[in-house]
Amino acid sequence: MVYLYAAMGVVMMTGIMAVVEMGLSLTGQSLLLKPVDSYQQNRELNAVGKRDQQMLGLLHDQADLDAIGRSLQSTALCVQLLCRSSLLGAASCAAGNSVVEDAETRLPDLTGLTQAGVIPSAGNWANACVLQSGSHRLIIHPDPSPDNLQIPYRLFSCVLSGASTCSFEPKS
């Protein structure tokens, strides 16, 4: 009789656990907490998302690309992007590149960017330009083999949380 009650208890607990697991899988929730994503948290608060969108718009606009240059690398790329989006001195800008007349309305979140250096020439990240505004870090990398020749640069972005580089950047 004791064995019967023990077996029925095990079967009942198995059934209850199956129902709980099924309920969790249907709602898509987990019992484990999600890790904190500082990029997602700061996207709405600190204009991080707007800055990313404006930089992508700058890198995809054909008139801007013609002015900036389509085959620049590292420091030259950073300088020309800053020329196009902020009030960087015109002396360092390329001949056809200058601050856009509507930069304050079209690219307002890019005006606070500063050059944070370049990633050392190593592997896939060679010749990348690094711009930063506070804890928001933008990495613009020339695409070595672009699928679309109209888009010659890639944009990578992160929010730094106590580190000096993004988690996906190569360690020097």
Image (tube, rainbow, N blue to C red):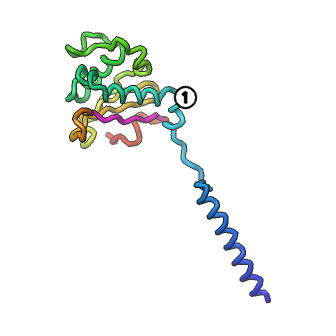
In the rendered image, the vertical position of residue 2 relative to residue 130, given as above or below: below
x and y, in percent, of residue 75 in the image: 26, 25
Which stretch is magenta? 152-160
Q: Which residue is farthest bottom?
A: 1
Residue 109 picture quarter: top left
Residue 67 picture quarter: top left
Residue drawn at x 74%, y 78% as measured from the top left: 9
Tally of numbered discs = 1
The three-letter code of the residue at mark 1 reads: Leu
Question: What secondary structure characterizes most of the magenta part?
Answer: strand
In the rendered image, the vertical position of residue 111 relative to residue 165, given as above or below: above
Q: Which residue is farthest right?
A: 1
Residue drawn at x 68%, y 72% as measured from the top left: 15
In the rendered image, the vertical position of residue 41 relative to residue 76, given as above or below: below
42 to the left or right of 117: right
Residue 76 picture quarter: top left
Secondary element at image label 1: helix
x and y, in percent, of residue 73 in the image: 23, 29
Whether residue 5 is in magenta: the answer is no
Please give the residue where the numbered disc 1 appears in the rendered image. Answer: 45
- Which quarter of the rendered picture does the C terminus lie within? top left
162 to the left or right of 72: right
- Which quarter of the rendered picture does the N terminus lie within? bottom right
x and y, in percent, of residue 153 in the image: 28, 33
Residue drawn at x 54%, y 47% as measured from the top left: 35
x and y, in percent, of residue 145 in the image: 21, 41
- Dot 1: within a 10 Å radius of its alpha carbon, few (fewer than 14), some, or many (20 or more) residues? few
132 vs 72, nearest the viewer: 72
